Each structure stands twice: as C-alpha cells, then as structure tokens.
Image (spheres, coloured by chain):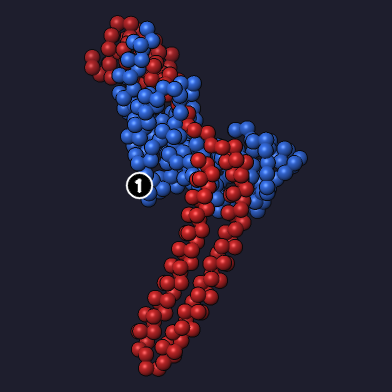
Amino acid sequence: MESLPDIKTGFGLTGEKMTRDRNISDTEAIAEVQDGCREAYQIIVQRYMHKAYYLALGLVHDHQDALDLSQDAFIRAFRKIRKFDNGKPFFPWFYRVVRNLCLDHIKRRRVRNEIPLAENLILREEDRDKEMKSVLRRGLGQLSFEQKEVILLRYFQQLSYKEIAELTGRPLGSVMSALFYAKKRLRERLVPYLETNKEENQ
Amino acid sequence: MNDDHKKIKELIAASFDGEMSAEEKRMVAEHIESCVSCRKAYEEMIRFEEVMNKMELQKPSRDTWKYYWDSIYNRLERRIGWILFSVGVMILLFFGGYKGIEGLIQDPGTPLLLKVGILTILSGIVILLVSIFREQIFVRKRERYKEVEK
C-alpha cells in the first residue's frame, strides 16, 4: 500500500475524516463505493494513482497520455465497481483495466516505437551517462508490449514472477519466458557498452 | 552439455530476480567456478542488473498528484451534464435544420424515401457537429495542459 500525499485539495474527503479513512482497507473503501459513496473512491484513487500513472507512462511513453489513461482507468473502474467481486484484491482487477486501455491506445494511435522514451526514462545518479540512457531507450523501444510490460513490473514495481503472473493473468512460465527474453534482448544491447565502461573504469 | 549451459544461464537470470532455490544457487555456483562462458554471463548479468536497477521513469510535477483526484471527481460529476448538454444541442440543431427544410418535408409531392434520406442526413450532420465540437474542447484543453507541463 502506498503512502498517501499530504496535500488534499478540492472535493471529496477532508480533514479528520480523510485522516481516519486513510487507514481503512481497500475492501472497506470499495464496499462504501459499492453502496453509493462516491467520495470513498478517493481513498482508492489516491492509494493507486502513482502505480497506475507509472504503469501507463512505461507503456505509452507520454506524460499527458499516461495521465489521461490512468484517470480514464479509474473512471472506468468506478463505473464497473458494482460488478467487482469485493472478496478479491482490487489492484489486479484494476491493473487489467489500465493495461487494456493502454493497449487500445497503442493500437489506435500506433505510438509504439514512435514516441521517444528518452524524456521519460532517467538513470538515477548517473543521468550524466547519456549514451547508456540512449542504448536503454532504444532497447526498450524495440521490445514487444508483453516484454515491456514484464520489465516495467519487474524493475519499476519490483514484483516477483508470481506477482506478475497474478497481475497479468498469464501463466508463470510465460512470465518467466517473457522476462528472460526481454532481459536478454536488453543485455545484448548493453553488454558491449558495459564492457567498454568497465575497461575505462579499471 | 549445451543444455546444461542453457539451463544455468536461465537460472542465473532467475537468481537476480530472487527466484532461485538454495539447491539451484549451489548448482550455479559450482558450475560458474569451472565454466568460463557461464561465469562471463554471470558477470554480465551483475552489471546489467546494476544498470536496470538505476532505471526510473521521470516524475511528473507535484500538481499532477495534487489535482489528480479532483480531475476524476469532476469528470464523474460532469458526465451527466455533458450528456444532457449534448442531447439538448442536438435537439435544437435538429429543430433548426428541420425548420429550414420543413416546406420540402411537408410537401405531399416529395417522395417518402427522399424525406427519410434528408432527415437521416440532417440527423447525421447534427450528431457530427456536436461530436466535433466536444472533441475540439477536449483537444484544446489537453494541448493547453501540455504547454504548462513543458
């Protein structure tokens, strides 16, 4: 569960109620939403908005599109919330909504490999290394949607194989295979560069 | 033997994701002691993981999170408003359009099929106009926001 932002503006829950409600579980919040309390949905949105945005950003490579798609996903999920089985975890269900919207967006706009990832991809501490960033950007841009998805879930969300399999609804073997080949493709691009870098460092 | 190398390389990849058992770890450790090729793959993997773990996506501005919920709430609230507005505009446009061709429609000499055709075209034009109008509003809003972000 992600920590919630301190700042609350505009509509919805405020003050003491907001603070108290930050501690309620997804199940309790969703039960309230299913009973018609629209404001309770704010808890769910603020709990998962970062994950939703970054997943969309990793898949569609554009800030504004990622923002719109992640918000669209929350709106779509809200409209289907009464059909959601509240005995099950919310995020895997919601993730599929985000994923399908991103996939539709990519198919519709044909943005795959066309919008550069450079502006959205940074390397912590070593952002000075533009060459490596460029190599990574090109490598990621050439992965299939499924390969890019597992890389994002593994490295940006730090999920295990099992968690990725549960989230995407794919068999464990399929996830392992996609991750293996995605990493292999990226490594093939990076290794010559890393070897040069290593020699330089020695 | 090649199968062994393939298996070890798969295990090496898995080891960096924390997905290897103690027995598999032992098997890999023993293998890379004596196999130059797999040891090279292991070292490459270490460096690869270092790079990948430094990878991050660009953070959006603070305002993105500040207004995130408000934007969703507004869109949920406004949906019914947009539906009513669109239906109202369509009725008015259709009424205006109909008034323009009322004479032709009410003329008993006009064939029924022609009347149906004209009314269908008029309905289509009205729906398209409202649709384009709404699209323009959303596109303008998005482009303005993009400029703010830059």
Image quadrant containing the N terminus of chain A: top right
Q: Circle 1 sits on which residue?
A: A110
Question: Crowdedness of circle 1 by 10 Å Cα count: few (<14), some, many (20+)?
Answer: few
Q: Secondary structure at mark 1?
A: loop
Give the total of numbered labels: 1
Residue in front for this viewpoint, B1 or B69 = B69
Residue in front for this viewpoint, B48 or B126 = B126
Please state the horizontal and vertical placement of residue B108, each as a whole percent of the image. 40, 94
Establish if A26 lies above or below A138.
Answer: below
Image quadrant containing the C terminus of chain A: top left
- Chain coloured red: B
The furthest residue to the left = B1
**Which shade of the palette goes to chain A?**
blue
Amino acid beneath label 1: Arg
Q: Is residue A72 visible?
A: no
Residue at (49% x, 50% y) in the render: B143
Q: Chain of mark 1?
A: A
Please state the horizontal and vertical placement of residue B73, each as a whole percent of the image. 62, 51
Establish if A151 lies above or below A29.
Answer: above
Residue in front for this viewpoint, B109 or B62 = B62
Q: Is residue A8 visible?
A: yes
The furthest residue to the bottom = B108
Establish if A71 lies above or below B54.
Answer: below
Establish if B31 lies above or below A31.
Answer: above
Residue at (48% x, 67% y) in the render: B130
Residue at (40% x, 13% y) in the render: B25
Residue in front for this viewpoint, B26 or B14 = B14
The furthest residue to the right = A16
Q: Which image quarter: residue B34?
A: top left
Please state the horizontal and vertical placement of residue A4, each as a whole percent of the image. 64, 35
Residue at (50% x, 36% y) in the render: A54
Please state the horizontal and vertical placement of residue A168, each as a whole percent of the image. 44, 38
